[in-house]
Amino acid sequence: MKVVAFDFSQDFTGVRVLMRSALNAPIERGVVTNTYRIYESIKTIRKLAHGGAKTVVCGHIGRKATDSLLPVWEILKKEIGPSVLFASDVIGKDAQTKVANLKNGEVLLLENTRREPGETNNDYSFAQKLSSFGDVYINDAFADSHRSHASIIGVPTFLKHFAGPHFIQEMEGIAPAQHPPSPSFAIIGGAKFLTKEPLIQTLLDRYDQVFIGGALANDFFAAQGHEVGRSLVSFNTNAKEFLINSKLLLPSDVVIDSPEGKVVREVDEIEPRDMVLDVGPKTIQALKAHIEKSRFILWNGPLGNFEKGFSEGTEEVAKYVAAAKATSVIGGGDTIAAIENLQIRTHFTHVSTAGGAMLQFIADGTLPGIEALKESS
Ligand code: ADP
Ligand code: MG
């Protein structure tokens, strides 16, 4: 079985479409601070609405079940219009009533799916109830499809299911990164130790060179026996095993936050009260040289704590990758947010809204959400 793309050329007037979108945008004080992921979802929602479907959109937001999709609704209303409604629950009274009254061309956004405990443990009866809101199911949430959650893998067992256009774009855009042409270079940063470290081995197998930066590098410094001070470290890793691999590259200097302000230090000079927050200038120059001689570049994860102003490493590297002749696949919610202001998004071959899902798809060649779309319902 193959993943089947939803056919927008057919007449779907009045068809109830239950769509899973990637809506998990960063929110601060009730306002969405980076809209890239939502705009990608909106393109598909708008197509369905214009075609006269009764579109029910579901997705998750934040880490806590109490987090709300209301700020995302504000954006959908602004972009698509007042025909976008909101249900204050997922499968409760409000959602049921609003689904039943949905008119052709209207869109109903359901509240954060993770408010239902059945979402994360893929509960059968939750998936069944959610499925009752649609005649067909579309998964357009590639970025969430590494999760075996009800709205990703449970619902398609009940409904005729399709991949949305953004989902297909992601699969096709990321696929070349699975087996890149030489010389290939992977740059991995960020802070999601548990998600990313298991994938480093696969990247070392398939790429000519793998650079580890961001907070992830701190684990490697610790494994090398260096002082890491007050830096963010997981201390729960196999970093040591990778150190012997000559393809592995680490920062040689770092930017730390000290009482005197930003200070650059060699990695073996980090002091107990230091906090490593970015890669240093020598490291950036070394990265530049690797980027310029590569034919293929994969990049996920900011190289520093950019939210707090430690953004130089990330921004410089972004500019070098953007200017390079290489094919470039970059992704990650925070990575995209970090380079938003540079306005260089169109200079990469593929920009994925996915971070963890992108890396898992590169390593495994598939995702739970992809497998669920292949099975017959
Ligand atoms: P992505 O969303 O792009 O996949 P992650 O979610 O893995 O990236 O990590 C992003 C986070 O990593 C950001 O919040 C950033 O501040 C943080 N980060 C990167 N480097 C450091 C560092 N040296 N110390 C603390 N946090 C860091
Ligand atoms: Mg992130």
Image (tube, helix red, strand yellow):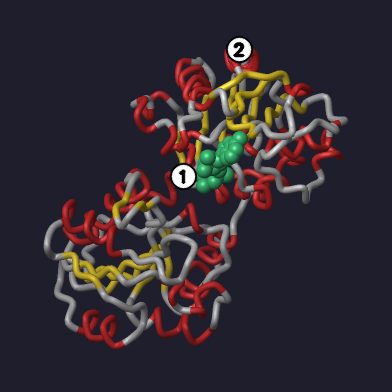
- Local packing at callout 1 (Cα closer than 10 Å; few below 14, some 14-19, many 20+) is many
Q: Amino acid at mark 2?
A: Gln
Instruction: Find disc 2 in the rendering and name its residue.
Output: 285
Q: Mark number for residue 333? A: 1
Task: Tell me the distance, in whole angstroms, between the alpha carbons under discs 1 and 2.
Answer: 25 Å
Figure quadrant of the N terminus: bottom right
Q: Position of residue 216 (x, y in %)?
A: 67, 39
Q: Amino acid at mark 1?
A: Gly
Q: Position of residue 158 (x, y in %)?
A: 46, 79
Label 1 beta carbon less than 8 Å to ligand 1: yes
> Would residue 88 appear left or right of 124 to someone viewing this image?
left
Measuring 15% from the left and 71% from the top, which residue is drawn there? 104
Q: Upstream in the sequence, badge 1 or badge 2? A: 2
Q: Position of residue 105 (x, y in %)?
A: 16, 66
Badge 1 element: helix
Q: Position of residue 322 (x, y in %)?
A: 45, 21
> Would residue 192 appear left or right of 341 to someone viewing this image?
right
Q: Is residue 175 visible?
A: no
Where 270 falls versus 57 (above or below)? above
Res 280 quadrant in image:
top right
Q: Nearer the viewer, residue 185 or 224?
A: 224
Q: Residue furthest left?
A: 82
Q: Nearer the viewer, residue 72 or 38?
A: 72
> Would residue 116 appear left or right of 13 to someone viewing this image?
right
Badge 2 element: helix
